[in-house]
Image (spheres, rainbow, N blue to C red):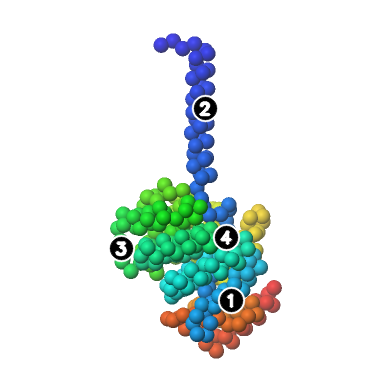
Amino acid sequence: MHTNRREAIGAIGAAAAAAAMAGSTAASAQAARNLGSKQKTLFWVASVTPCDRNLKVDLGALKDITQWFKHQGADGIVVLGTTGEYPSFSVAERKAVMEVVGKNKDGMNIILCPGTPNFPETIELSKHAADHGADGLLVIPPFYYKKPPTAGLVKYYSLLFDAVPESLAVNLYHIPGTSAVPITTDLLNALKHYPNLAGIKDSNNDMPEYQAFVKDFPDLNMRTGIGGGGRLEYALDHGMGAILADGNLFTKQYAGVFAAYRAGKDYHAPLAKLREQEKLLRDGGVFSYGPMKYALSLEMGTRQTYQRPPFLDVTEQKKVAIQRGLAQIKEMG
């Protein structure tokens, strides 16, 4: 059939409009995804949860610690994660912790770990977090039952997504060494239709696996939970964030690394200095929650806080080593 010039131009215009509309729709879908923060390359402290000598949650110390992290430059805090000893606290205690952090966040991005082995309590904690200042969740798979089918995990997480507001960003917690239930690409793809699927925290010490996560899900925030072994550098160079336990004791230093990256400056020099400082404390025996909380109390100039069993108190020998390491770090500036 013969087409005149006006019809041809009209057809071209219609095609261009359709293409523009498709592009606009794709852009809108991307913009509509809730990652829980305006920027991905942020630094979250995987915060400790302080207890007093009687092993009760020390909410006063928690308030001080939250404000300390803000003062030291943290972009956000992950509350009641692995470093926060979440399985050691009751549902009521976990709610109280979230309430204190939420009241004292002072502009920081707050992510709560609400995970339990059952969906009713996980949903209860998630809704409570949404009501008390949380920007997002970090949800471990239901543990105890090993090797659950992917379809079962999809159902579990779907119950959560359907129960919480879309304003609450949901991240999946990949820590199979502890949960024995890995987060897989199949699981992420099955949940990606939820606009508040924000990403993951990857605490599995497998660099090729992490690289694959970043490659396969560039639109999500595939945060690293491991700072060493080139992981932090890879995360930053690919526009991803980090949630780090070492941030408890090196908040200002990690904040400086991220600030340098975001300013377009060389972040490798401050990172190399940070690595030297971290080694001084590791040599001093800071590898468990008791020593970590003791070291943090020295940095803050506050009373010592404690951890719950099965973790042990810091020994007198380790206290001396930690004091020596902190003194050396102070000398380094």
Q: Which residue is label 4 attached to?
A: 109
Q: Nearer the viewer, mark 1 or mark 2?
A: 1
The quarter of the picture where the N terminus appears is top left
Q: Horizontal and vertical percent for residue 21? A: 51, 32
**Amino acid found under the numbered disc labelled 3:** Lys
Q: CA distance from mark 4 to mark 1?
A: 20 Å
SS category of the residue bearing label 1: helix
Q: Do the CB atoms of the residues marked 1 and 2 lie less than 8 Å apart?
A: no
**Residue 317 higher or lower than 34, as above or below:** below
Q: Which residue is mark 3?
A: 147
Q: Earlier in the sequence, mark 4 or mark 3?
A: 4
Q: Position of residue 22 (x, y in %)?
A: 48, 33
How far, Cα to Cα, is label 4 from label 3?
Answer: 33 Å
Residue, far bottom: 316
- The residue to which callout 1 is attached is 60
First in residue order: circle 4 vs circle 1: 1
Residue designated by label 2: 17
The answer to which image quadrant residue 316 occupies is bottom right
Q: Secondary structure at mark 4?
A: strand
